[in-house]
Amino acid sequence: MRIAQPVQRLTPYVPGEQPKESSVVKLNTNENPYLPSPKCADVLKGFDLHRLRRYPDPVFAALRARIAAIWKTVPERVFVGNGSDEILTLAAKAFVDDGETIGSLDPSYSLYKTLAAIRDVPFVPTPLDADYTWNGKIKGHPALFLLTNPNAPTGVLTPSEAIAAAARRFKGVLLVDEAYADFAKSNCVPLATAADNRCVIVMRTLSKSFSLAGLRLGYCIGPEDLVEALYKVKDSYNVDAVAQAVALAALNDLPWMRANVAKVRKTRARVAKALAKRGWDILPSDSNFLFARPAHRPAAEIFAALRDRHIYVRYFPGPRTGDRLRITIGTDAEMDTFLSAVAALDKA
Ligand SMILES: Cc1ncc(COP(=O)(O)O)c(C=O)c1O
């Protein structure tokens, strides 16, 4: 069997664990603990099976129109993907030539490095400062810079003015991955919709704030020529008919999403305060998770001990991440279970 060289060399991305038991407290993959809009359930209940006989709309016209209306832009500037992960793969195809590079912050979403390896181009990390903030400079001259904002796994937000300044200097495509921006105090969509924008793409997902990780729906907004390039390289029917219909229902019920986001933010503040009181170091989070350094025992030990108690958080070994845990914000009851376990485990 012949396997291409880059794939032979590839270390694949490892997603967070999806335990089979339903009784676990699952705080490891930044899912939303609350249900998606009931309008999504209505669409699923009433879904006409004849629509599944036919191929879906290849250019998702209704969804694009809705997304364009939400952000006061035109549908020509909107692209939709089978999850935002698909858009990242397509961006690596569309915007990077052989011999060029892909960059991102370090630490950041670890999939980016894998995407560069699949695309068979070097990956150039830009290290964050000691306090996990970004100074606005991009290392090397990547053709594509993937900027998670708020960042993951840190939760730290870079102000949009700093990103606008970086974009003015940058020669490549700057893709701002705003997977968590609905939980933040600001976002960069105005940079993407600006008339004079030539290089900024802002990407969103329905997996987090809209509680639809199982649906697989992401979108992005950018200059028309870049969006057109994404259409050129996508599969003909990359977003299925059910996903298009359910996503449209969710996007037609923004108050539902915003109410869930408000609950998550309130719980986030409460949990951050409780952990800080125990002496844990908590980075300021603008997302639906906390990146926290335990006070008395190594993060790896707390991670394993929590797992033994069926409480799943995320642990990323490594020099900038290995002394911390990434804790997704769940319901108040789930977070109380987590906090009680921490109280028992993290003794001096
Ligand atoms: C920064 C970031 N971007 C993208 C994604 C992927 O989102 P999607 O579910 O839309 O593929 C994630 C998921 O965890 C993420 O953390």
Image: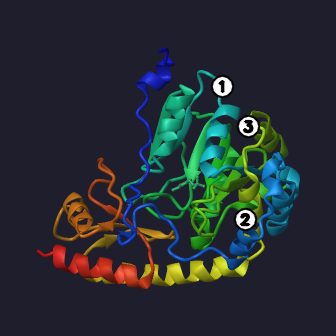
Residue visible at 63% across and 69% down? Answer: 210
Compared across the picture, whether 339 is left or right of 96 comes to left
| Image location of residue 249, percent across then percent down | 76, 70
Judged from the image, the quadrant occupied by ligand 1 is bottom right
Tag 1 or tag 2, which sits nearer the N-term?
1
Q: Marks 2 and 3, how far apart in space?
A: 20 Å
Few, some or many residues within 10 Å of mark 2 (<14, 14–19, 20+) = many
Residue visible at 77% across and 70% down? Answer: 46
**88 w.r.t. 332: above or below:** above
Residue visible at 42% across and 50% down? Answer: 107
Tag 3 or tag 2, which sits nearer the N-term?
3
Q: Marks 2 and 1, how far apart in space?
A: 36 Å
Give the residue type at disc 1.
Asp
> For numbered disc 3, what is the local secondary structure?
loop
Give the residue type at disc 3.
Asp
Few, some or many residues within 10 Å of mark 3 (<14, 14–19, 20+) = few
Q: Quadrant of residue 23 in the image?
A: bottom left
Residue occupied by mark 1: 97
